[in-house]
Amino acid sequence: MRHGQTPWNAQGRLAGWTDLPLSPVGQAQARQLGEWLRQERFSRVVASDLRRAVETARLAYGEPEERLWGLREIDFGRLEGLAWTELPEEHKQALLRFDGFRAPGGESVAEFRTRVYAALSALPEGRVLVFTHGGVLRLVLRELGQEGFLPPCAVVGLDWGAQRLLFVRGG
């Protein structure tokens, strides 16, 4: 699932590796999602190591058992913190295409994919609840034939072993 809203999300700023907290709206989103998630049982709970994902996990379900660097958002490099309206047109178009994008001073989508897929593939079998970021979910969904951006606290159900999308909630 994607973390709750941060102040930068609300302002339309690129938030990659900056360790942002949830906004009050994001905290409320996570608590609300918790009402649904607590009806489910998971064999493991993991989160990106960034505060916004860990805080969402705590509020929505409980303390994550692991914090994984590999589940971080893409490193936006010198674009980090810029609002969409401040981005040069070439970077806007590259981000929209996603394939072939490389953040100046940051990660390429290919490097991002390698990191994320290594982290996901290393997870144990079973029902694992993963708290991560919009870019991670966008990457996985695109490779399963789905397009679009997911809002904060969206949930994606995957059968990772079969590389099959089960559902998208909130997107």
Image: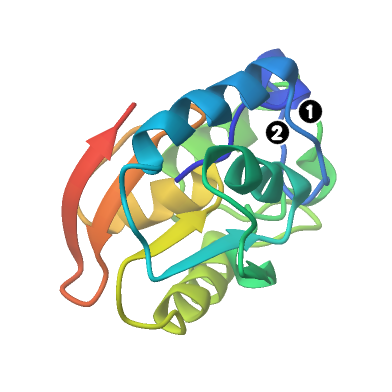
Pointer 2 residue: 14
Task: Identify the image quadrant of the C terminus.
Answer: top left
**Can you give x and y, in whole percent of width and height, for residue 47 in the image?**
60, 59
**From the viewer's perspective, is residue 114 above or below residue 108?**
below
Colour logic: rainbow
Residue drawn at point x = 42 percent, y = 49 percent: 137
Pointer 1 residue: 82
Foreground of the two, 60 or 165: 60
Q: Considering the numbered disc 2 on the image, is that residue within a helix, a strand or a loop?
A: loop
Number of marks drawn: 2
**From the viewer's perspective, is residue 40 above or below residue 128?**
above
Residue drawn at point x = 25 percent, y = 58 percent: 158
**Can you give x and y, in whole percent of width and height, for residue 14 in the image?**
70, 33
In the picture provided, is 170 more to the left or to the right than 84?
left
Q: Are marks 2 and 1 in contact (CB under 8 Å)?
A: yes
In the picture provided, is 55 more to the left or to the right than 98?
right
Alpha carbon of mark 2 to alpha carbon of mark 1: how far?
6 Å
Neighbour tally class for label 1: few under 14, some 14-19, many 20 plus, Cα within 10 Å: some
Q: Considering the numbered disc 1 on the image, is that residue within a helix, a strand or a loop?
A: loop
Q: Amino acid at mark 1?
A: Leu
Residue 149 in sight: no
Foreground of the two, 79 or 3: 3
Foreground of the two, 17 or 93: 17
**Which mark is first along the chain, 1 or 2?**
2
